[in-house]
Structures are given as C-alpha cells and as structure tokens.
Image (cartoon, rainbow, N blue to C red):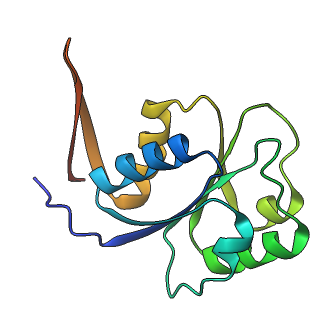
Amino acid sequence: MRTVDAERKAVVVERDGVHRNTIRVLLEGIGFEVCEFSTAAAAARHPFERVDLLVVDLSPGASIDDEQGRALRGMAHPARIVAMSSASGAVPSWLMEAGCSHVLTKPLDVDGFLDVASAVAGVSIRIERTCSSDSLRAGEKG
C-alpha cells in the first residue's frame, strides 16, 4: 500500500467552494499536493515549478479570458488537464491546444474523476462502498 506523500502536484481552479473542497479531498486521498483557487486570475498569478494535473472549471460564470487561459496553459505543460463543466459546450481553444485530456460534466462523477486522477498519480484505486460511507484506498500500480 502506498503512503500519501504528495509526490504529485495538482492545481484546481473551481469557483464553487463545495466542488473545490470535494476535488481537493479526492486528490489528496490519492497522493496529490493540491493548490486550489476560486478564479483563473488568482491561479495565473502563482508561479508553479511543476504541475502534474490541472483541473479547470468551465461552467458558466467561471469566465476565463484568453490571457488567463494562456497563463494556465503555460503552468500546466506537460500536465494532464481535466476540464469540468455543468453543460456540454465548446471547449476553449487554449484548453485544447494545451492538451486537455478529459472533459467531465458536473455534477462530479467521482468514479470517473478518480479514474483520470489515479492514472496521472500512477496509482490504482479501490472504492469500498458500505451502507454508512465510502472509503478510498490507493495503491501503487503494478
């Protein structure tokens, strides 16, 4: 069993605090160190040495202009990028150029999100469902 030692860095840009917190908890559970921001502008102001996973909110109201998009694209290279949106729509060109690997819809599909994130982290996950709660276990991929 792998210990959570934050070998991977994730940046989460999500305006909704509940979604942001949920994503942070899920990512930390499989070994990511998470930096979270409510706006692309705030994330773009922070220099990152390395970003392994960039999660970006594309929902209406989470406007990301071209300049902010270019800054996010620059920070993420060569990271995996996951875009999340509450509606199916066009993915901005800066995101496709940056190599967006997945577009997920809201509400968050936890299993689908963890499949993507665990592949980036290089871990296999097992979700144990019980009547009272779910527990998440991460282990090294073999």
Along the viewing direction, whichever of 81 and 119 lies nearer the viewer: 81
Q: Position of residue 14 (x, y in %)?
A: 62, 52
Residue 63: image location, x then y, percent? 83, 55
Residue projecting furthest to the front = 17
* Picture residue at 86% right of the left edge, 55% below the top: 92
Name the residue at 37% across, 70% down. Answer: 8
In the foreground, 25 or 4 = 25
- Where 70 falls versus 141 (above or below)? below
Is residue 77 visible in the rendered image? The answer is: no
Apparent side of residue 118 relative to residue 42 in the rendered image (left or right) = left
Instruction: Give residue 37's position: percent from left, percent from top.
Output: 58, 64
Q: Is residue 27 above or below residue 126?
A: below
Would you place residue 74 above or below residue 98 in this image?
Answer: below
Q: Nearer the viewer, residue 24 or 101?
A: 24
Percent position of residue 67, x then y: 87, 76
Relative placement, left or right, of 21 versus 15 is left
The residue drawn where x is 83% and y is 48% is 91
Residue drawn at point x = 24 percent, y = 35 percent = 126
Q: Is residue 34 visible?
A: yes
- Of residues 92 and 101, the one nearer the viewer is 92
* Residue projecting furthest to the left: 1
The image quarter containing residue 80 is bottom right
The tally of labels here is 0
Q: Relative to 77, does residue 65 appear above or below in the rendering?
A: above
